[in-house]
Image (cartoon, grey):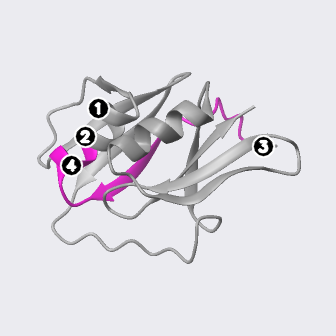
Amino acid sequence: MAIKLKGLDHYAIAIGNLERSLTFYHDILGLGILPRPDFDFEGAWLDCGNGISIHLIVQEHVQIISSGSRSLHFAFGVEDIQTTKKILTTYGIQIIKDIKPRPDGILQMFVQDPDGYFVELTQG
């Protein structure tokens, strides 16, 4: 007997500064802000589409453990990866791994958010 999952609901990440993270995820990437219960800690919920959200949780000391973009990351699909790259660089977001095709032909690039999380952006 197996559990019948309905799908991914949300992914939570610890962040150091809510305003800085909202600038990245809401203002630059365009994720909508969702209603959030009145927790006893600061944070925000962001709409990734298809019923999936990212929960930003403010913590005093955020330590990101990562050995590279493939080890721990999440990904967003975009309509036009070239335009996305131009917008990101306009905002001073460093491209960690530039646009290149995966073996399946999907274009991908990697950036880091303000706390150092790797974010993959794909088109295909």
Q: Which is more foreground, mark 1 or mark 2? A: 1
Residue at horizontal 25%, vertical 38%? 44
Q: Earlier in the sequence, mark 1 or mark 2?
A: 2
Q: Badge 4 is on which residue?
A: 20
Asked whether residue 17 is drawn in magenta, I would say yes
Q: Amino acid at mark 4?
A: Arg
How would you rate the neighbour count of disc 2 (Cα within 10 Å): few for under 14, some for 14-19, many for 20 or more?
many
Q: Is residue 77 above or below residue 34?
A: below
| Image quadrant in which you'd find residue 39 | top left
The relative height of residue 88 versus residue 53 in the rendered view (above or below) is below
Q: Which residue is mark 1?
A: 27
Q: Earlier in the sequence, mark 4 or mark 1?
A: 4
**Residue that numbered label 3 is attached to:** 2
Badges 1 and 2: C-beta atoms under 8 Å apart?
yes
Q: Amino acid at mark 2?
A: Leu
* Alpha carbon separation for disc pair 4 and 1: 10 Å
The residues tagged by marks 1 and 2 sit, at their Cα atoms, a distance apart of 7 Å
* Quarter of the image where one finds residue 14: bottom left
Residue behind mark 2 = 22
- Is 91 left, or right, of 65 in this rendering? left
Residue 31 figure quarter: top left
Q: Secondary structure at mark 2?
A: helix
Q: CA distance from mark 4 to mark 3?
A: 41 Å
Label 1 CA crowd tier, 10 Å (few <14, some 14–19, many 20+): few
Give me the C-alpha separation between circle 2 and circle 3: 38 Å
Sequence order check, earlier mark of 2 and 3: 3
Q: Position of residue 59 (x, y in %)?
A: 20, 62
Q: Is residue 117 above or below residue 104?
A: below
Element type at mark 3: loop
Q: Are marks 2 and 4 in contact (CB under 8 Å)?
A: yes
